Image (cartoon, rainbow, N blue to C red):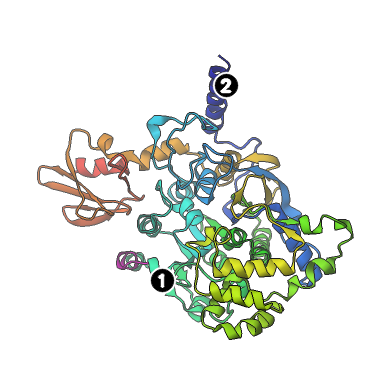
Amino acid sequence: MKKVFLLLLILVVSSDVLLSQSYKKEVRPTKNVILMIPDGCSIGVLSNSRWYKIYNKLGGENLAVDPYICGTVKTFSSNAPIGDSAPTTSAYMTGMPQQTGNISIYPVADPENDLIYVDPAKAYQPLATVIEAAKIEKNKAIGLVATVEFPHATPADCSAHHYNRKKYAQIGSQIAYQNFDVIFGGGNSILTDDIKSHLQSKDVNLIQNDYKAFKSDSSDKLWALFGDMHQVYDLDRNPEEVPSLEEMTQIALDKLSRREEGFFLMVEGSKIDWAAHSNDAIGMITEYLAFDKAVQVAIDFARKDENTTVIILPDHGNSGFTMGSSASSRGYDRKTIHEFFRDFSKFKKTSEGLEKILEKSTPDEFKSLFKLHLGIDLTAEEVELLTKVHHQKANNYMEVSSSVNISSVIVDIMKSRTPLWGFTTGGHSGEEVFLAAYHPKGDVPMGMNTNTDIFNYLYSIAGLQTPMAELTRKIFSKHTDVFSGYKYSIDKTNADFPVLVVKQGKTTLEVPAFKSVAYLNGKPFDIGSVTVYIDKNDTFYLSGALLDVMNKR
């Protein structure tokens, strides 16, 4: 009986939260919205970044974000207290917490573990995002800025729909066909001829690995990508070849602010999370400080514009990073700022940056390279260990600290010289994250907020009025419902990009998956929203307006 009562309580509370789209207090909409996400940034990163900035005299004793910190956020997946970037930012975007790997899509029910009510009948349903709503309902310009490949989890959450965050081909196509005004980041190797052709058809300028062209570009619509996949860490960045996050944010704002109806921009400090997975403290701190400079750009713009809201919050914590560890437990309160930061501040490369240098070097150069870039005198044993793992790589950035590889060995050596910092894990962590915001009239979210509260705030501050469930039904209806009574089939010649084919008399409608273009008797036209195909249930989710196209023939 008690279990039934608890389930009913979860159902009532969850339904209440998910049906209400207004924030918990009145907020006045603004023309522009800037959402800034320092990925995987636990509160310890802020504390250590602030002290690092003070010790190294990098300008004042405060971070740009400090005056605007107003609360915390409880982030979680639909069925787990700790989430990865895919379900956590998806919750901010759609109002529905999701499962690991989900990109803005309704989760599969997990009744024994669900923390909110999940309707089994809605599994795999693409969910409209606030960015899609801002574009469709308000005709706002939209933009994404990140330092990883453009289909990576956080930018994908804002612009695509899939149950598997690793499906870059399908996610990348959706992002391109969402017709963003600005996309800056990495991922040149992911671009296809189809994506390039589509960008050209929409008068979008594409710049690849050309910093000078990026700085001088005058177009209204621009994709600028640097690196085959992710960009390099800010500490390792060549400022003459790769722009900083600060620069990318400034140029994005310059372009997006030309739209009379306003804009919605998401900026991600992507690789704070990557450094945290590696337990690379210098990478975490310098990546956050690079992000903090971008925050200052956004705040300066908002204060001058007087009609812009800036929301800054991580999607989840990572690594349990602390100032203080078991090595400093005795006499920890006597450890000076010099003891914490003197040797640490000699690090001029991240572990990834040094790894790339060592890849091109021989073992007899290791000692001089460590001394040059990290100020570390290697022992003979350390040289021997580095030699053994010289060409061993982790499978991906999430597994650096949990396997033996060249990067993890570099990190271990760095940690051995700076033992006063602590890490509890090489993975994500479940603590609440910080929340900061600026609103021209002071309407900021306060106190502890859930991820759903953040969605409600974004929805309200963007001035949206169409209920998200209604927009979802409008642009993501099942093809079996839209074309009930019609003759249709699914062409799976290309299994990754199937095509829905609908016929009536002499009229043939072809709707490719993961694009926003359809073909009526061979002639292309813009649908206005992307089409999503889910192989799990062999279903196309598409705009209901396509039925009108057939009926007009």
Q: What residue type is labelled 1?
A: Asn
x and y percentages locating residue 516 in the rendered image: 32, 53
Q: Separation of disc 1 and disc 2 at Cα?
A: 54 Å
Q: In the rendered view, does 196 fall on the left or right side of 1?
A: left
Residue 6 circle label: 2
Residue under the image location 88 percent in, 56 percent down: 333
Q: Quadrant of residue 298?
A: bottom right
Which residue lies most toward the left here?
506
Q: Residues within 10 Å of mark 2 (few under 14, many from 20)?
A: few
x and y percentages locating residue 118 in the rendered image: 47, 31
Which residue lies most toward the top here?
1
Please state which of residues 460 and 540 is positioned toward the viewer in this rendering. Answer: 540
The magenta stretch is: 191-198
Q: How crowded is mark 1: few (under 14 residues within 10 Å), some or many (20 or more)?
A: some
Which residue lies most toward the right here?
334
Is 503 placed above or below 170 here?
above
Q: Does the magenta stretch include residue 487?
A: no
How many numbered marks have been drawn onto this rendered protein structure?
A: 2
Do we see residue 416 in this rendering? yes
Residue 205 circle label: 1
- Label 1 with label 2: CB-CB less than 8 Å: no
Q: In which quarter of the image is residue 120?
A: top left
Q: Main secondary structure of the magenta part?
A: helix
x and y percentages locating residue 16 in the rendered image: 55, 28
Q: What residue type is labelled 2?
A: Leu
Please state which of residues 374 and 517 is positioned toward the viewer in this rendering. Answer: 374
- The quarter of the picture where the C terminus appears is top left
x and y percentages locating residue 482 in the rendered image: 27, 37
